[in-house]
Image: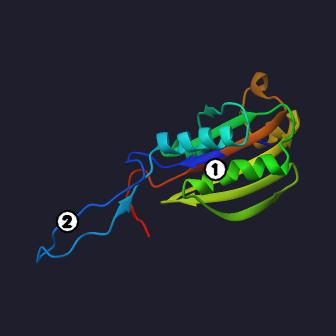
Amino acid sequence: MTVVALTACNGTDGGAAHAKPEDSGSRTVPARSVLKVATVRATIRAAASAAGLGRPQFTNPTTKLSVRSSCWVTAVINTGAKPDRKTFDAFVTAFKDRGWKATDEMPDTSGVGLAVDKDGWSLVVLAGALSKEQVAAENPGLPPDQVHAFRGVSVAGSGTCGAPTPTP
């Protein structure tokens, strides 16, 4: 199975408080936060390092939905063997350490999956193994010479594309 990461784009790294006078000049606008694709990719790299995995390969999105959005991230980390739960947990912990919230664990016949969310972004993180046939079924339209069995982690997701969201 592959790990796909969704990320935000066209914003600033992390949160920033912006004071803006209102009518009376005595109020401020709440702090807002926007993630960029580069920040999400950096988080994926840090998670891979923390879990002792190889370097992520960031891929071009191929789904109809993702092609319409520049705020879409996909990444795969081929590990050669199906990652164990301890490795998956270390990968996800690195996201949590950077302020991402784990939401729903997803049962998956080929491994384990989890959604993580932050500032208008949602990523699906999957770890496991897929046969060549399963990869082909999951990626219709992929040229046959690019279809290979997969063992590792994949991250995929999208975000708010620069529209700031209030931070708690």
User: Which residue is found at the position 75% from the left and 49% from the top?
Assistant: 126
**Residue 131 image point, x, y percent:** 88, 37
Q: Position of residue 53 (x, y in %)?
A: 73, 36
Provide the residue designation for mark 1: 94
Question: Which three-letter amino acid code belongs to the residue tagged 2?
Answer: Lys
Badge 2: few (under 14), some or many (20 or more) residues near its Cα, within 10 Å? few
Which residue type does callout 1 highlight? Ala
The reply to whether residue 65 is in sight is no
Query: Which quadrant holds the N terminus?
Result: top right
Q: Which residue is mark 2?
A: 20
Q: Quadrant of residue 82?
A: top right
Which is nearer the eye, 115 or 99?
Answer: 99
Task: Identify which residue, 168 or 153, lies in the foreground.
Answer: 168
Please count the marks in the image.
2
Residue drawn at x 75%, y 62% as measured from the top left:
105
Q: Is residue 107 above or below residue 22?
A: above
Q: Is residue 107 visible?
A: yes
Callout 1 crowding tier (Cα within 10 Å): few <14, some 14–19, many ≥20: many
> Mark 2 or mark 1: which is in front?
1
Query: Going 34% across and 64% down the picture, which residue do you hit?
Result: 31
Residue at figure coordinates x 63%, y 58% from the top left: 116
Given residues 165 and 141, the one toward you in this image is: 165
Q: CA distance from mark 2 to mark 1?
A: 34 Å
Query: Which x, y percent locates residue 24?
Result: 11, 78
Q: Is residue 166 left or right of residue 156?
A: left
